[in-house]
Image (tube, helix red, strand yellow):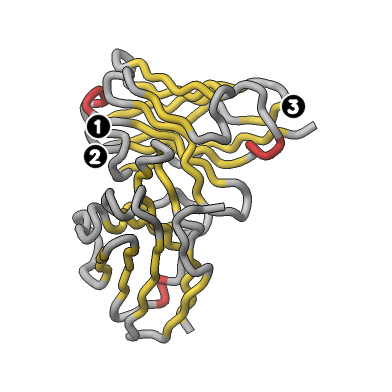
Amino acid sequence: EAQLLESGGGLVRPGGSLRLSCAASGFTFSSYAMSWVRQAPGKGLEWVSSISGLGDDTFYADSVKGRFTISRDNSKNTLYLQMNSLRVEDTAVYYCAKGTGHPSGWYDYWGQGALVTASS
Amino acid sequence: QSVLTQPPSASGTPGQRVTISCSGSSSNIGSNTVNWYQQLPGTAPKLLIYRNDQRPSGVPDRFSGSKSGTSASLAISGLQSEDEVDYYCAAWDDSLNGQLFGGGTKLTVL
């Protein structure tokens, strides 16, 4: 069974940077698109970014475009999210999620989440 | 502000059948499949329905999904107290080139 484990969350000052990692196991990592979805405290789910299985296609929500970068290392079965110029409104639990063959599909496995807090 | 519109709340009594709606547009629900997620408090979301009406293994057949035009629905029959959690619809949007989630519906079992 697929397993996803996020790491790298924490407290950061507005304007600062943070990199999240998601270690995957139990499936052929390079065959599946992967995504990041976040949830602000007490709010609903918000899609952040997706990447194709080979890493050659990336997609971003307008709210993070130009500030966040999604990437993956298929040799390490790991997904990343580099977050720069963080804002208070980026405070949320960030989930990595396993997709289907294309980023437009559904998410059948989710990690436990990593809390990112942007605050002065 | 979500482009997929769900009612913020829904309710029913044990054993009853309830439906949760999800309204979108031609660029999302109208041209792509709809998926539904269930989220218990403090936990990660769980896939409940995919490709409009398909259930992953392990999901009870009390849960069903449907889609018509630019709208979709999640139906829960034989309502149980454990169903009292949050539900989200989602679909890819071809104009935004990204995944959209509905605002979520909190289900209350009276």
Task: Output the chain of dot 2.
Answer: A
Q: Residue B9, how many percent across, how many down?
A: 51, 72
Q: Nearer the viewer, residue A120 or B65?
A: B65
Residue type, label 2: Glu
Residue B20's label in the rendered image is: none
Q: Quadrant of residue A86?
A: top right
Q: Residues within 10 Å of mark 1 (few under 14, many from 20)?
A: few
Q: Residue A62, how many percent across, how many down?
A: 53, 34
On screen, A83 above or below A116? above
Q: Residue A31, how many percent across, how many down?
A: 21, 26
Residue type, label 1: Gly
**Residue at the extreme top:** A75
On screen, B54 above or below A77? below
Task: Output the chain of dot 1.
Answer: A
Both marks 2 and 3 on one chain: yes
Helix, strand or loop under label 2: loop
Give the residue drawn at x 42%, y 76%: B81
- The residue at which mark 1 appears reads as A26
Residue A1's label in the rendered image is: 2
- The residue at which mark 3 appears reads as A13
On screen, B32 above or below A74? below
Residue type, label 3: Arg
Q: Is B71 displayed left or right of A60 in the figure? A: left
Is there CB contact under 8 Å for labels 1 and 2? yes
Both marks 1 and 3 on one chain: yes
N-term mark: 1 or 2: 2
Task: Output the chain of dot 3.
Answer: A
Helix, strand or loop under label 3: loop
Give the residue drawn at x 20%, y 58%: B54
Helix, strand or loop under label 1: loop
N-term mark: 2 or 3: 2
